Amino acid sequence: MDAARLGRPSRSAATAALQAHIKVLRGEPLKAALAESLREADGLGGQERRFTAFAVRELSRHQRLLDLAARLLGHTMGKVGLTEDQALVRYALWRRLFCGEGWKRIGPEVRLPGPVRPRTIKDDLLQQVVESPLPEAPVADSPAERLAVRYSFPTWFVQRLAQVYPEDVLEGLVSSLDEEPALHFRVRPPGTRDAVLAALAEEGVAAEPVAAAPDAVRVVDASHRIFETKVMKSGKLQVQDVGSQLISELCRPAGGSMAGLTVADVCAGAGGKTLALADFVGPSGRVLAGDRSRRRLAEARERVSRLSLRQVAFPHPLPLSDADVLLIDAPCSGTGSLAREPDQKWKLTAAKVTEFQATQSALLEEVAAQTKPGALIVYATCSVMPEEDEAVVEAFLAKHPDFTLEPVGDVLGAERAALAAQGPYLKALPPRVPGGGFFAARLRKQARG
């Protein structure tokens, strides 16, 4: 494993990672658990903190495979006992199987008197977990089950995806969602990518353009030095996934500019797409941003203020009938973002996906009722589940003959549509489009008369 990506392992870093994973196992969201554990860990250096964050994500990311390995070695997780013990066994196996380390390196990180209490597992058992030959796993009955085991996903989830995606697409998708994602950025202002890449090179940061989106760049350097660059501090780069950038781009008229338009960002969240839309509409346009989460909208306000984007406002309620374009980045299962939030795959159920579908349909109906004739709705999710994507759009169109579906290829062009579109829809799926999985549809309300 790349040392720059891994960070620096230490007993203190392992302790913080284990404490965070235990919190995750007890129901806390991974991001919150990690932030809390890092606050509690005194004196961790930057590379140790990097290791802690990576380890916590990896323990959730590969949980099913790690538990299978433990079972093959005679330690079924349901019988291990304490949550702390389960975390220790997973950590030791992750260091062995995914980092290629032996007991000489792993032992100092986990052996008594720490790093977690209480525990019933002694050092000799953990040493056996690390050093005992690993028996071969039985082969699963179906291709979907084999993929679910290999890439650590719930079986129901992969079986559902197998019903809609060809096998080669399916494996590429679940494989990508089981990896630590690369950092992607949006260059601002739009159209300055070459100049920004040159400036980054001058500062010694290796980055490259991403073909799927005109302003997207990927950082090749795994050290995160980019956040200390003049380019980043001057506001010329925004962290944003490639598929998310494509969704913002789909708010543009086919073959035209968004300059001067009024856009309503209905589910603005922390403001990633709000910032992109503000750059697109320019000083003569307006972006009206809202969200049901006050906490997330407060973050969006702060980001907008930091960049002095005067064209963004946060009215409540949003005057949707004023908007030329309405972006609905709908609440969803987040299945396209599981590489970044791997703990969520163990919390998601088919029933929850159905609940999201009902919420999405109701939201689309609510916005459509206030949309003026001639305006464009862009419905989007970061889900790869068809129930939340095509099914929502098709059910809506069946009830609303005054809306028409516009192909996303009209905006993306043939070459990029071949990468990121499926029929009239945006289906930005890794690894063809790097990053997470995203969906979008363009719905035009017919003009009167």
Image (cartoon, rainbow, N blue to C red):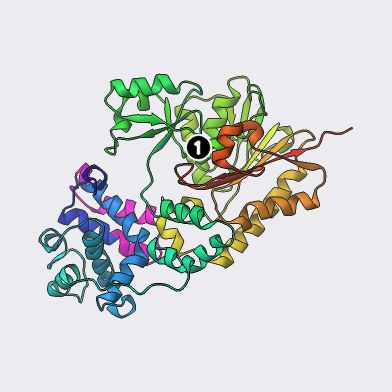
Residue 419 in sight from this viewpoint:
yes
Above or below for 98 versus 252: below
Measured as percent of width and height from the top left, residue 160 is found at 56, 64
Q: Give me the residue at 55% from left, 34% from top.
A: 274
Task: Tell me the quarter of the image containing the C terminus.
Answer: top right
Above or below for 186 versus 42: above
Residue 271 in sight from this viewpoint:
no
First to last magenta residue range: 20-47
Measured as percent of width and height from the top left, residue 218 is found at 39, 34
Q: Give me the residue at 24% from left, 75% from top.
A: 73
Assign the magenta stretch its main secondary structure: helix
Which residue is at the front of the view, 376 or 171?
171
Above or below for 95 versus 42: below
Q: Amino acid at mark 1?
A: Gly
- Residue 35 lies within the magenta run: yes
When asked about the image quadrant of residue 14, the answer is bottom left
Q: Give me the residue at 78% from left, 33% from top.
A: 374
Measured as percent of width and height from the top left, residue 303 is found at 46, 33
Residue located farthest toward the right when viewing the structure as drawn: 449
Secondary structure beneath dot 1 equals helix
Identify residue for label 1: 272
Above or below for 409 versus 86: above
- Residue 194 lies within the magenta run: no
Instruction: Classify residue 172 as left or right of residue 227.
Output: right
